[in-house]
Amino acid sequence: MMTEFKNSAVEPPGRNLPAAYRYLSTVDVIKMTLVLVILLQKIAIPGTASAFSFSFLVIIVTIAQLMSRGMLVDIRSLMCLGGFLSVGVLSYAVVATDKFSFTSFALAAVIQSFLIFRIRLSRDDYDELLHFFVKIMIILAFVGIIQYFSQFIVGNLAFALDVYLPDMLLLKGFNLMNPLYYGSPTIKSNGFFFLEPSFFNQFLAVAFVAEFIRKARVAVLALFIVASVLTYSGTGLTMLALIVPYHAWRQRKFGLVALGVVGVMIAIPLGGMLELNALTDRVSEFSEKQSSGYSRFVGVIPLLEYALHVRDGSLFFGRGPGSVQEYFLKVSFGTFDPTWGKVIYEYGLVGSLFYASLLYFAVGKGQPGLRFPLAYTYLVLGGYLLNPFITGVMALLVVWPGTSEEAAARAPYPSPDQFEEDGRVQFRVLKARP
């Protein structure tokens, strides 16, 4: 069931909207939002102690605007979100920990609410949106390549936002400038606008999949790979290793895979020049406790073991929102809380069940092309439960557009006779047609 929330004082779509907004289609609004969310992700809102980026604000404003156009709320997702948050409240009453964070709980409530909405997009509109996303990433791939090589000529100017922007305008808590290795003068490419090289790498990987399943232009795919290599991050490559073989087999694009193998063989002699050992040597990080690879993919296991051995209800209801920080203080090595691990640790098995249901109805019922790439990125490659940027982009590209069946069955455009005579929109519930 989907509910269309329309305030009785809101006019039908197109009326009393700003002129610049009135003539934008819904897909144009989504495209504009996507650009702003990507470009403003590392710019902090003044007065927030550099804790919130403008990307967060852009998503909130977009939701408010799209609700005036008849944005839908998926009741199933809303109920799952309500159950998930209820477990967060329950954990505060059941589990004895002083690390419960009301701020973390409030952020989870707001950011996860991005996943309960749906909009009306035709198949052609969605194809246009994907094509636009690929075009954005083509431009940013060139920006990232130029940024990497220009640092040897202009120095820190290649990372102007990270170096010269006032601290109050830079989002805190991210490795904005990351050297190839400790003591290296060379900085990994972060695409100028991205929070970290790993973020840039992950989005290049998602764009690679979007291009691969559609036009599969060799030059574009090669561009994304080159830009990914210059981030010296392997996170996005793990996703490509999982998803590209599947699409290559399904769409019979074996020639592209063979071409990719040839490209790797040609690139091997250039490894020394580009210091590719800084990337290939990271394979050994899975066994090194102080490494990024161990922290991201392995460090979560002892974290969950700790939660399972605490006999105070943590197994079922978690340690409470924000409580993962208590574990970080107990270990001597660097650790990390990927989204899936954070959910289990802080919300327990019951909360995880609600959250898995939320993702099923939100992402699982979303557009199929990028469902797995973005879900894998969101759940495995980062601690993104409270990250409005990653969650917002997943909502824009997968969740909000929904599937064509959902759009057709659950979201018919309102006809003129569905409005009151005075032009105000009625509150109504949309049920799937049999």
Image (tube, helix red, strand yellow):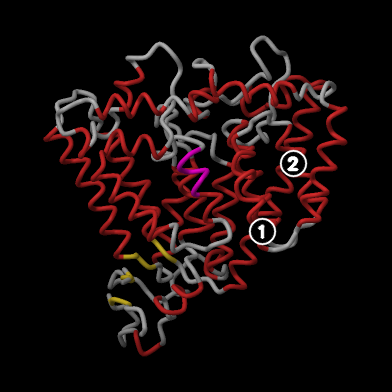
Identify the residue at image location x=73%, y=33%.
Answer: 229
Q: Earlier in the sequence, mark 1 or mark 2?
A: 1
Q: What residue would you read off at disc 1?
A: 132
Tell whether position 378 is magenta.
yes
**Left or right position of 210 against 260:** left
**Left or right position of 359 against 185:** left
Can see residue 233? yes
Give above or below for 432 relative to 149. Answer: below
Q: Amino acid at mark 1?
A: Phe
Identify the residue at image location x=45%, y=28%.
Answer: 50
Can see residue 164? no
Give above or below for 163 relative to 332. Answer: below
Tell me residue 109's x, y (percent): 30, 46
Tell me residue 235's x, y (percent): 59, 35
Q: Amino acid at mark 2?
A: Ile
Q: What residue would you read off at disc 2?
A: 225
Tell whether position 188 is magenta.
no
The residues tagged by marks 1 and 2 sit, at their Cα atoms, a distance apart of 19 Å
Nearer to the camera, 28 or 233: 233
Identify the residue at image location x=63%, y=60%.
Answer: 130
- Kindly indicate whether the residue at mark 2 contacts the one at mark 1 (C-beta within 8 angstroms): no
Chief secondary structure of the magenta span?
helix
* Mark 1 neighbour class, 10 Å CA radius: few under 14, some 14 to 19, many 20 or more: some
Residue range corresponding to the magenta coloring: 375-380
Tell me residue 392's x, y (percent): 47, 49
